[in-house]
Amino acid sequence: MGAESADPGEVLRTVWQGTPGAMQDLDAECSPTKACRNMKDITFDGYAEEGGDLATAWRNTLAKEGKLGTGSVADLVFGDPD
């Protein structure tokens, strides 16, 4: 299966069902304890209107961009039951 034709959900399921030894290699390569210093000054101030709900503002932005999905994370991991 080529990367161009792979279903993103299928790729994630394959990664999540990986072998424990591979996870140790991944942890060594991408240390989960390392702090990301580039994101320390990132905030969501001003993203929502004054007194507005940040989650609603984010959801509206995703909907406007056509990125709002109807499934759940479980659907993504385990596949669509349909």
Image: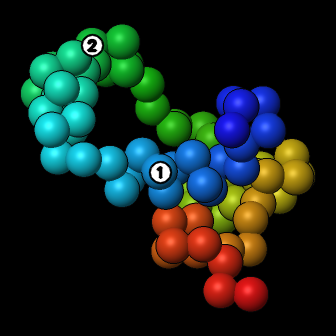
Q: Which mark is residue 41?
A: none
Relative depth, front residue between 35 and 19: 19
Tag on residue 37?
A: 2
State the SS at label 1.
helix
> Tag 2, which secondary structure?
helix
Residue 6 appears left or right of 41: right
Name the kind of residue labelled 2 in the image. Arg
Dot 1 surroundings within 10 Å: few (below 14), some, or many (20 or more)? few
Which residue is pictured at 24% across the width and 21% down the height?
A: 30
Residue that carries the numbered disc 1 in the rendered image: 14
Pick whichever, 65 or 27, lies toward us. 27
Residue 13 lies left or right of residue 81; in this view the side is: left
**Which amino acid type corresponds to the residue marked 1 in the rendered image?**
Thr
Residue 48 in view, yes or no:
no
Q: Nearer the viewer, mark 2 or mark 1?
A: 1
| First of labels 2, 1 by sequence position | 1
Q: Which percent across, then down, holds residue 76?
A: 58, 65
The quadrant of the rendering that contains the N terminus is top right
Q: Residue at 78% across / 30% down in the picture?
A: 4
